[in-house]
Amino acid sequence: MSNSSSLNEFLLLAFADTRELQLLHFSLFLGIYLAALLGNGLIITAVACDHHLHTPMYFFLLNLSLLDLASISTTVPKSMANSLRDTRAISYSGCVTQVFLLLFSLSAECSLLTVMAYDRYVAICRPLHYGTLMDSRACVKMAAAAWASGFLYALLHTGSTFSIPLCKGNVVEQFFCEVPQILRLSCSDSYLREVGLIVVSVFLVFGCFIFIVLSYVQIFTAVLRIPSEQGRHKAFSMCLPHLAVVSLFLSTAMFAYLKPPSLSSPILDLVVSLVYSMVPPAVNPLIYSLRNKELKDALRKLVQRQQQ
């Protein structure tokens, strides 16, 4: 296969070659996917329908749930469909679409988590200015900026990835089209062009990470100055879910894309991709709802309303 122009399809990783294991793979992925759909769908519905949750924090949480749904819906349904149909094929355009949508959702989520850290910083460190700095117009602008930055980054990265000639076949050793796996099919003399974009990506992610860390250093410094134990507990309850989601998202994504080649192996690559592409969308709703009384009350009202 001389170059990417002759490619009509890619062959994704097959989890199993027996029908029973293929059905098991389908069932496991279906369970995780339905859990993500249910959890994020409930959060979106609760925030949209309950006027008590029409605040900046829950507005950004709604956007986070939308991006989580976009992320897991990009990869999992195709893998499940391939297992049912006993095939590994994905069209060239389908692979490009997967790469674009996954990069878009992940990069927009990184930007949104940074915005959410700023929201928590203003709420705790500058509470008297919260209404001014985080009014509805400012929140919409920040969310739109996160989505727009994700779109532009995905457009640039996807175009760069698929403009490189692919000379080493069409077998992608992953259950979805992943940029590192696509680059392994590229010609060696064309790979350096993509390295520059990856370096830029690392600096952008690192910038978000530094901003979040600095925000939380100031947040925890302010929280420890609160005289009442009840006040400190309330402040920590506001921050810990977001901090847990950030830690889960950044640790899995950065390890997947920045691990040294010496640590790379088919099994490890598969496990890491499963963790960063499926675990955060399924677990994030649980993390946010466990310690959040307002959200749990809204979900309880929503369920009771449906039962009546």
Image (tube, helix red, strand yellow):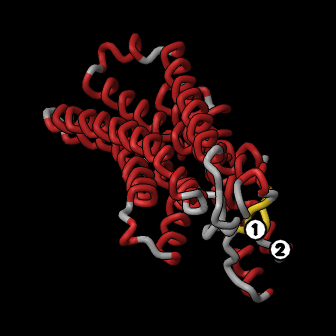
Quarter of the figure with residue 261: bottom left
Along the line of sight, the residue nearer the viewer: 29 or 167: 167
Q: Is 237 situated above or below 28?
A: above
The amino acid pointed to by label 2 is Leu
Which quarter shows the N terminus? bottom right
Q: Is 7 situated above or below 142?
A: below
Check if mark 1's residue and mark 2's residue have beta carbons within 8 Å: yes
Q: Residue at x 49, y 44 (%)?
A: 193
The residue sitting at the top extreme is: 132
Quarter of the figure with residue 154: top right
Residue 248 rendering spot, x and y as whole percentages: 41, 55
Q: Which residue is mark 1?
A: 80
Q: Residue at x 77, y 57 (%)?
A: 7
- On screen, residue 99 versus residue 129, left or right, reads right
On residue 84, the disc is 2
Along the line of sight, the residue nearer the viewer: 22 or 173: 173
Q: From where the camera sits, is residue 300 visible? A: no
Residue 52 rendering spot, x and y as whole percentages: 55, 28
The residues tagged by marks 1 and 2 sit, at their Cα atoms, a distance apart of 6 Å
Q: Is 74 situated above or below 1?
A: above
SS for dot 2 = helix
Q: Residue at x 79, y 56 (%)?
A: 6
Residue 278 rendering spot, x and y as whole percentages: 58, 60
Crowd class of label 1 (few under 14; some 14 to 19; many from 20; radius 10 Å): many
Crowd class of label 2 (few under 14; some 14 to 19; many from 20; radius 10 Å): some
Q: Residue at x 64, y 49 (%)?
A: 99
The amino acid pointed to by label 1 is Met
Q: From where the camera sits, is residue 150 visible? A: yes
